[in-house]
Amino acid sequence: MGVSDFVIHINKLLAIMKNYHLKYILVSLLILLTVKVNAQEILKSKYYFINGEKVFSMQKSNDTLYTFKCNSNFDCAEKASDHYKILKSKQDGNRYLFEVEKLDSLQLTTNPIPDDRFRLIGFEKISENEIKIINEARSFTKDSIVKIPFEVKYLDNKFGFTYYTENYLKSFRTDYTITPEFAKEIIESCKSNTEIITQYNNTNTGDWYASGISAELLTLEMIKLNLSPINAKQKMSKALKD
């Protein structure tokens, strides 16, 4: 093989390597873009958690998470009650982990912007209409949060409250009554959901008076019965007083 032939072969090899490198870069960029787009898809509209007459909502816009207080007609306050800046995110299948910084300052305190304002919030997309939000009552400083491995498996076996779309919640029967006997049946069925209750007991939810877990179980039960969970708590209370 002459020098000229050798040069030709080397140029062909470099071209192949260049093309392979280019393909590798394009594939890598496509994967990163897909993950970013999927992360943007999560919470692109409001999802709601029903707790009696109280309704809570969470929504994502660009790099910020917002929580709102609403009523049973899904009318929410114009001003968000909490703001979280998303610092980084990671996705694994239908689960997402966000590292966030709480932007709201504390009122009536000498330390309005505390050091432990960082959190890890998880999301699990159950369906187009349901999303589980794992938001432990656990805060970190900037130094302490970096010690937590930023992996989606951090969410394994943790309890989360289920939020639903407005249209989905409005799709269930509202013209029903709850008798005392029916109310007791619902309570017993809620108690039998041991897997969720165990997860709840093993997760630091900050749900000090257990109103959240009660609402979670009641909503799941009402949906299973094809009955609207909106105002179900009030109907239950009235039935048990009769």
Image (cartoon, helix red, strand yellow):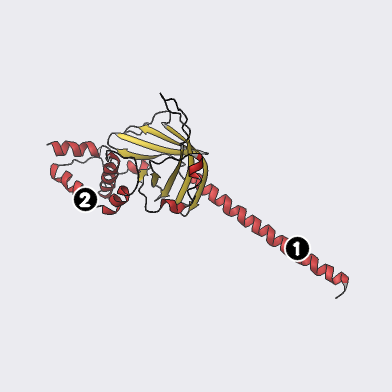
Percent position of residue 169, x then y: 33, 42
Q: Residues within 10 Å of mark 1 (few under 14, many from 20)?
A: few
Amino acid at dot 1 = Ala
Q: Which residue is mark 2?
A: 189
Left or right, 72 with respect to 133, comes to left
**Picture quadrant where residue 1 is located:** bottom right
Q: Residue at x 80, y 69 (%)?
A: 9
Give whichever of 98, 190 is nearer the camera. 98
Q: Which residue is mark 1?
A: 15
Cα–Cα gap, marks 1 and 2 = 67 Å
Q: SS for tag 1?
A: helix
Give whichever of 101, 240 is nearer the camera. 101
Percent position of residue 182, x then y: 16, 45
Q: Residue at x 54, y 48 (%)?
A: 36
Q: Residue at x 71, y 61 (%)?
A: 19
Label whose residue precedes the other's in the sequence (1 or 2) = 1
Amino acid at dot 2 = Ser
Which residue of the protein is positioned furthest toward the bottom in this rendering? 1
Q: SS for tag 2?
A: helix
Percent position of residue 136, x then y: 38, 43
Give whichever of 223, 64 is nearer the camera. 64
